[in-house]
Image (cartoon, grey):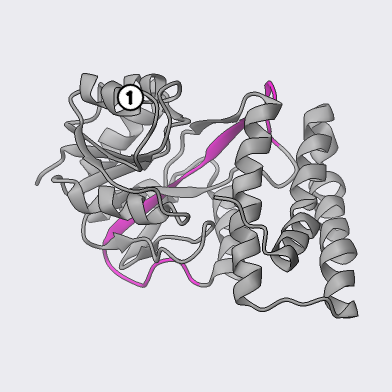
Amino acid sequence: MNNKLSVVLATFNEELNLPECLDSVKGIASEIVIVDGGSQDKTVEVARSYGASILVTDNPPIFHINKQKALDMAKNSWILQLDADERISPELGNEILHVISLSDDQMEEYQKNLSKRDLFFRHQNLLEERDGTIGVKSSTYQAFFIPRLNYFLGRYLKYGGVYPDGVIRLVKKGNVHFPCISVHEQMEVNGKVGWLENDLIHKDSPTFARYLARNNKYISLLALELREKEVNKNPLSVINYMLILPTVWFLTTFIRHKGFLDSWQGFIFSLFSSLRFPRAYLRALKYEVVS
């Protein structure tokens, strides 16, 4: 059995984030694959200094297209797909190497003994309510969610529905792919999907400027999706996107899911994430989608 691990990333102007990310996987990766969307900084030079296999291409709005290219380039049977602002702790690295060395029966037993199993599968049920069934019935595990701990303006968010923020990151080559349709899409998995125990560190928004820049890109993609749905200025759409959706989102994350326990960072997160609905709606109506 080939238990070597490929680590793959799609990048664009990530020279500041990439070194810490790649340092965190040096002890577990037998190869590193980078698909770069034509960065204008030193991202490619940084990747080359780590001995990565590199493909330089364009930077499509649906960046999962480049993530899929990176998956396709990987040579090993197990692949860890990361973003440049994510970090692998030593504990998570050891867990990854352990899990990919297990037999199918041992993987099944491992899932039964997860200490946060109930939390993880409640979260997965919510994801499936939104996205549809994740994975298929099978005797073999082809992918694993990793709980993600998000760093937001100086604080790791634990409430507001943010944690465990499960993301499929550890996958078996050939049986998992991105549909490449939407920015928030789930990977499609031809097999069972399990969970790992240790957190993936996500340095998503250490500063407000970085958060606003990333938020603006997501709003542009959401606006594109709304344009494809042909949203218009009828009263029901106006009320829905300008009032109902943002209000429900804020109350759900800040009150129901106790975002207030994350201090002022929790308030900012709930507020600005709720404002994506009216902002995307207005941008879609004005056809002002930025690249």
Left or right of 25 on screen, residue 59:
right
Circle 1 Cα neighbour tier, 10 Å, few/some/many (<14 / 14–19 / ≥20): many
Residue drawn at 22 percent across, 24 percent down: 48
Q: In the current view of this chain or complex, which residue is farthest to the left?
A: 1
Q: Would residue 152 be seen by someone viewing this image from the given angle?
A: no
The image position of residue 49, as x and y in percent, is 22, 19
The magenta stretch is 133-158
The image position of residue 175, as x and y in percent, is 25, 63
Q: In the depicted view, which residue is nearer to us: 106 or 36?
A: 36
Left or right of 63 on screen, residue 215:
right
Mark 1: which secondary structure?
Answer: helix
Number of numbered discs overlaid on the protein picture? 1
Based on the picture, tell me whether residue 124 belongs to the magenta stretch: no
Left or right of 84 on screen, residue 117:
right
Give the residue type that dot 1 points to. Answer: Leu
Residue drawn at 30 percent across, 51 percent down: 171
Q: In the depicted view, which residue is nearer to us: 30 or 153?
A: 153
Q: Would residue 144 be seen by someone viewing this image from the given angle?
A: yes
Pointer 1 residue:
22
The image position of residue 54, as x and y in percent, is 21, 37
Residue drawn at 23 percent across, 30 percent down: 29
Based on the picture, tell me whether residue 149 belongs to the magenta stretch: yes
